[in-house]
Image (spheres, helix red, strand yellow):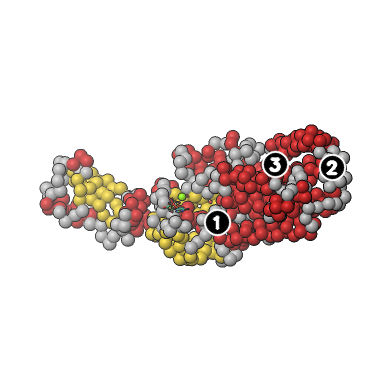
Amino acid sequence: MNIGAIRAIYVFEMARTFRTLLQSIVSPVLSTSLYFVVFGAAIGSRIDQVEGVSYGAFIVPGLIMLTVLVQSVNNAAFGIYFPKFIGTIYELLSAPASFVEITAGYVLAAATKSLVIGLIILATSFFFVDLTILHPVWMLAFLVLTCLSFSLFGFIIGIWAQNFEQLQLVPLLVVTPLVFLGGSFYSIAMLPPFWQTVTLFNPVVYLVSGFRWAFFGASDVPVLASLAAIVVFTVACIAVIALIFRTGWRIRK
Amino acid sequence: MADIVTIRNLTKTYGDGFEALKSVNLGIRKGEILALLGPNGAGKTTLISTVCGITRPTSGTITVRGHDTLKDFRAARRLIGLVPQEISLEPFERVMNTVRFSRGLFGGGRDDAHLERVLRQLSLWDKRDARILELSGGMKRRVLIAKALSHDPRVLFLDEPTAGVDVELRRDMWRVVEGLKADGVTIILTTHYIEEAEAIADRIGIIAGGDILLVEEKAALMQRMGQKQMEIQLQDPVTEVPAALADFDLQIGGDGTLIYTYDAQGERTGITRLFSALPDAGLVLRDVQTRQSSLEDIFVNLVNGDAA
Ligand SMILES: Nc1ncnc2c1ncn2[C@@H]1O[C@H](COP(=O)(O)OP(=O)(O)O)[C@@H](O)[C@H]1O
Ligand SMILES: [Mg+2]
C-alpha cells in the first residue's frame, strides 16, 4: 500500500478546493441557505408540523442530503475526469499505486469537501430554525457514510464520462430528481399508498429517512434498512471501481 | 553491461484490432542513452506506454531490474520516470507543487532538498512559484522532466522530448540528457529526428510498423552500414560514364564529376582499381572528395526494407 500516493492526491485536491473556495464551498452553502428562506420561512409558516417537528426544521436533514449528494457526486466525478481530460492521468497510471490508492485519494478528498459543506449548512440552519439533534453520533455517521458512498459513485461517473456534458448529465438527470423525490421536503407517509411503494425503490429515501431519524427520532423506513442501504451501495460502488481498474475500462488502453 | 530493462516478445493489439507492436524484444543497458528512432505511427509511444503501465500489453513480459511490470508493478514503476510526448500539466498549479505531487504519488517522502536539486538542474528553480500557464513551452517540457525525476528514477523515458522545439531548445535538452546520464540515469528517448539520435545516443534502435528492425551501437551502426561516396573531379568534365568504367558503381555528378559509391568497411574499396582505370578511359584526375553517408540514408534504406 502506497500511503504517500493517497496523501499526495488528497492534499493536491484539497489545495484545489481552497484555491477555488468561492465556487467549491461558498456557493453551495449560499444556495442552500436560500432554500431555508423560501421553504422554511415563507412556505413553512403556512404548513403545520410534520411528524411533530416544525416544517422549517423538518426539511433541514433533506436539504443537507440534497447538497451533500450532489456535491459528492460532482466533486469526485470532476476530480478524476479532469486529469483524464487534460492528460495528467498518465502520471496516476504510471505511479506505483493500485486503484485502491487512486480511488482513496480522490474519494476521500471529495467526501471531505462535501462533509465540510454539509456541516456548514447544518451550522447555518441553526440561524433559521429551532433544531435539536437527538442522535448526534448517528447523524454524523450517516453524513460521513453518505459523503463516502456518493463520492465513490461520482468517481465512477467521472471515469465513465467522455465529455463535460456526460459529466453533468448524471448529477442533473439522476441524482437531483432522486433526492427531490426521496422525501427531502416531505414525509413519505404524506404520499398515496401506491407512490409510497414506488418510493421504496428510490435509494435516497433510505438515506434521508435514516438521516432524519438521527435528528428527530422518527423515520419513514427502519433505521437498520437505511444503514443496510448505504452499506450495500458503498460495496457495490467499490466493486464496480475494482472491476473498472481490472479491465482498464476507459482508463488504460 | 547488464540490462536494466528487458522486454520479451511484447505485443500490443489495440481495442480496435490494430497491431501496434509485433513481438518486440529489447534489452536496455544500464547507464546508456538509447534512442528509439522511427517515423510517426511506428509504435514508439505505445512501446514506452506499455513499459510504464499506461497501456496494457497484449502478450509478452517486461522486467525492470528483474521486477515484472505487471506482477511486481510497484517495485518496477518506482525505478521508472516518464516524460510523455504531449505536454500535460495543470495550468493553474505552481511548479513546486506539481513536482511535489509527483514525488508523493511515487511514495517518496517529502524531500524539498532533492526537488531543489532537480529544479536547479533544469534551470527551473527561479520559476518554482510560477503557475504552469505562465511558462514557455520549453519550460513546461522541463517541468515534465522535473516531475519524472522527482522520485529519483533509475530509468527515464523521454517521448519525443524535442518534437516541435527550435534548435536552441533542442541543444538545451541534449545537455540536460547528458547531465542525467552523467548522474547514472539510464535514458531511453524516442525521436523521429535522425540528427538527434546521431547527436546524443550511445545506441540506436530503429522501429517501424511495430517492429524493432535493429538495435546497435551508434558508431558500429554507422560503420557497418555506412557507405562512402567519392566525388571525382576531372580535368575535362564528362556527361556520361565512359564504357571503360562500366564495371564501377559510378554516377555523373553536378559539373560533370564522377561519383563513386563504395562500402568503406568492405574488404576492398575498389579505389585503387578505379584510379588506375581512369587513364585507360582517357580521363585525367584533378581532385577527389569523400563523404560518409549519414544515419538518415541508413534509416531510409532500412525502413524501405532495402538493407539487412
Ligand atoms: N488507442 C489507440 N487505439 C488504436 N490505435 C492506436 C491507439 N494509439 C495508437 N494507435 C496506433 O498505433 C500506432 C502506433 O502509435 P504510436 O505508438 O503513438 O506511434 P509513434 O509514437 O511511434 O508515433 C499508430 O498507427 C496509431 O494510430
Ligand atoms: Mg509517439
From the viewer's perspective, tell me whether residue B258 is left or right of residue A218: left
Sequence-wise, the earlier of marks 3 and 1 is 3
Chain of residue at mark 1: A
For the residues marked 3 and 2, what is the alpha-carbon distance in whole angstroms? 38 Å
Q: Is residue B89 in sight in this rendering? A: no
For the residues marked 2 and 1, what is the alpha-carbon distance in whole angstroms? 50 Å
Q: Nearer the viewer, mark 3 or mark 2?
A: 2
Query: Relative to A196, does residue B142 appear above or below in the rendering?
Result: above
Relative image position of residue B308 (x, y in whole percent): 32, 61
Label 1 CA crowd tier, 10 Å (few <14, some 14–19, many 20+): few
Q: Is residue B266 in sight in this rendering? A: yes
Relative image position of residue B211 (x, y in whole percent): 40, 59
Q: A41 or A252, which lies in front?
A: A41
From the viewer's perspective, tell me whether residue A173 is left or right of residue A21: left
For disc 3, the marked residue is: A17
Tag 2's secondary structure? loop
Q: Residue at x 41, y 53 (%)?
A: B42
Relative image position of residue B69 (x, y in whole percent): 56, 62
Tag 3's secondary structure? helix
Q: Residue at x 54, y 46 (%)?
A: B176
For disc 1, the marked residue is: A249
Toward which corner of the image does residue B217 lie, by quadrant? bottom left
Label 2 CA crowd tier, 10 Å (few <14, some 14–19, many 20+): some
For disc 2, the marked residue is: A49
Q: Residue at x 58, y 36 (%)?
A: B133
Q: B277 or B161, which lies in front?
A: B161
